[in-house]
């Protein structure tokens, strides 16, 4: 049973990976090179390399946002809340893209909440790096962010 379960999960992920890779290659080919860099960083024993892998996840999310929902100088308003869609608001832009493409409010809520979580965590690591220090990040946490980012991109690209 364990072998069957293990193979099933691996098969599902491999199938998903192939689809996501093709879509990423078509949308922004540079992301494949960035993921290769991430994998090299993850093979390291150096926590700085793990932090760099997480920063690269942020750059990939931004690059995908730039291609799917380019920055806009004007904000939008949802109710009375202003939502900025500028160059650095890549999470907001991806959320708006998801909302514009998905017919399912449940899908929007799940993918949007995952995006917000990943975006906020990646930004906190990035902000610490900009100040000259890194948040403490261990290898397992870095691996989780890489996997979450990849799966999130798969969900977003499935809306195409």
Image (cartoon, helix red, strand yellow):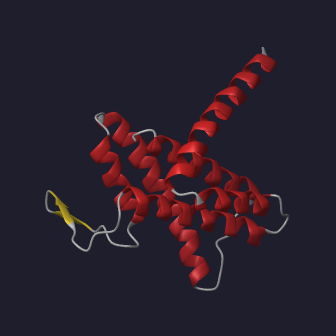
Q: Is residue 82 left or right of residue 61?
A: left
Residue 107 figure quarter? top left
In this figure, what is the number of numbered marks? 0
Front residue (pair 98, 5): 98
Where is residue 23 shown, x and y percent of the image? 53, 45
Query: Where 94 falls versus 129 (above or below)?
Result: above
Which quarter of the figure is the C terminus placed in? top left
- Residue at the limit of the structure toward the top, as seen here: 1
Image spot of residue 133 (x, y percent): 65, 81
Q: Is residue 112 left or right of residue 22?
A: left
User: Could you say where residue 28 lies in the image, as x and y percent from the top left?
Assistant: 52, 57
**Residue drawn at point x = 35 percent, y = 59 percent:** 69
Which quadrant is the N terminus positioned in?
top right
Residue extending farthest to the right is 45
Q: Quadrant of residue 53?
A: bottom right
Q: Is residue 10 above or below residue 37?
A: above
Q: x, y percentage for residue 27?
A: 49, 53
Vertical side of 110 occupied by 58: above or below:
below
Farthest residue to the bottom: give it. Answer: 132
Return the residue found at the far front: 26
- The residue sitting at 61% across, 45% down in the picture is 21
Direction from residue 7 to residue 134 in the image, left or right: left
Residue 106 falls in image quadrant: top left
Residue drawn at (31%, 54%) of the image: 96
Say above or below: 62 vs 127.
above
């Amino acid at each position: 049973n364990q072998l069957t379960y293990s193979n099933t999960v691996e098969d599902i992920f491999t199938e998903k990976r192939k689809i996501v890779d093709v879509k990423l290659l078509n949308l922004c080919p540079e992301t494949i090179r960035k993921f290769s860099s991430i994998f090299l960083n993850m093979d390291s024993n150096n926590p700085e390399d793990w932090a760099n892998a997480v920063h690269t996840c942020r750059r990939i999310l931004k690059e995908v946002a730039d291609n799917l929902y380019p920055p806009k100088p004007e904000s939008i308003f949802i109710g009375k809340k202003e939502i900025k869609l500028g160059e650095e608001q890549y999470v907001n832009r991806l959320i708006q893209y998801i909302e514009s493409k998905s017919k399912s409010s449940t899908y929007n809520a799940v993918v949007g909440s995952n995006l917000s979580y990943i975006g906020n965590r990646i930004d906190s690591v990035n902000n610490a790096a900009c100040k000259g220090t890194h948040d403490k990040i261990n290898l397992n946490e870095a691996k989780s962010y890489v996997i979450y980012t990849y799966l999130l991109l798969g969900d977003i690209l499935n809306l195409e």
